[in-house]
Image (spheres, rainbow, N blue to C red):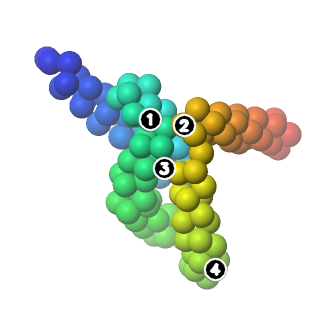
Amino acid sequence: MTDRRIQLAVVFLGAVAAGICSGLFGIGGGLVLTPMLVFLSGYGQHRAQGTSLVALVPPTGLFAFLAYYHAGDVSIRTGLLLMPGALLGGWMGGKLAESLAPRRMRKIFAAALLLVGAWQVISGLSG
């Protein structure tokens, strides 16, 4: 198998893992796809984050939503109330990300992952 085919296979398997994480935990792009695209595909931080959004938001978000909806685990009212803020925040976050240098962006990304991970560990141990 050529190096390009191996790389494509790794990207595909990473996307499968990201989809599973997205459906299971409500995350995926930031935790799986973005680091994979940076480290295995050589993408810059900004390009990796933008690319992961293309892959996850429309298709995976829809199918994960449908699975949770059919299980009765969705509050449509709350979701609709979250939409305007998430849309505005997504636009603002994208603009902010583009204004940051790639190295700084990676540090912020790593800090966010570390904080969320620490919070999950602490809340998991206390509950």
Instruction: Determine which quarter of the picture holds residue 108.
Output: top right
Q: Quadrant of the N terminus?
A: top left
Q: Earlier in the sequence, mark 3 or mark 4?
A: 3
State the quadrant of the C terminus. top right
Q: Amino acid at mark 3?
A: Ser
Evaluate whether residue 81 shows in this view.
Answer: yes
Front residue (pair 19, 94): 94
- Residue sitting at 81 percent across and 37 percent down? 122
**Disc sitting over residue 22 in the figure:** 3
Give the residue pinned by disc 2.
102
Image coordinates for residue 16, horizontal then vertical, percent: 35, 40
Mark 1: secondary structure: loop
Is 50 drawn above or below residue 78 in the view shown? Answer: above
Give the spatial CA distance, label 2 vs label 1. Answer: 7 Å
Measure the alpha-carbon separation of dots 1 and 4.
Answer: 34 Å
Cβ–Cβ below 8 Å for labels 1 and 3?
no
Cα distance between the residues tagged 1 and 3:
22 Å
Give the structural element (helix, strand or loop) at label 3: helix
Residue type at the position of mark 4: Leu
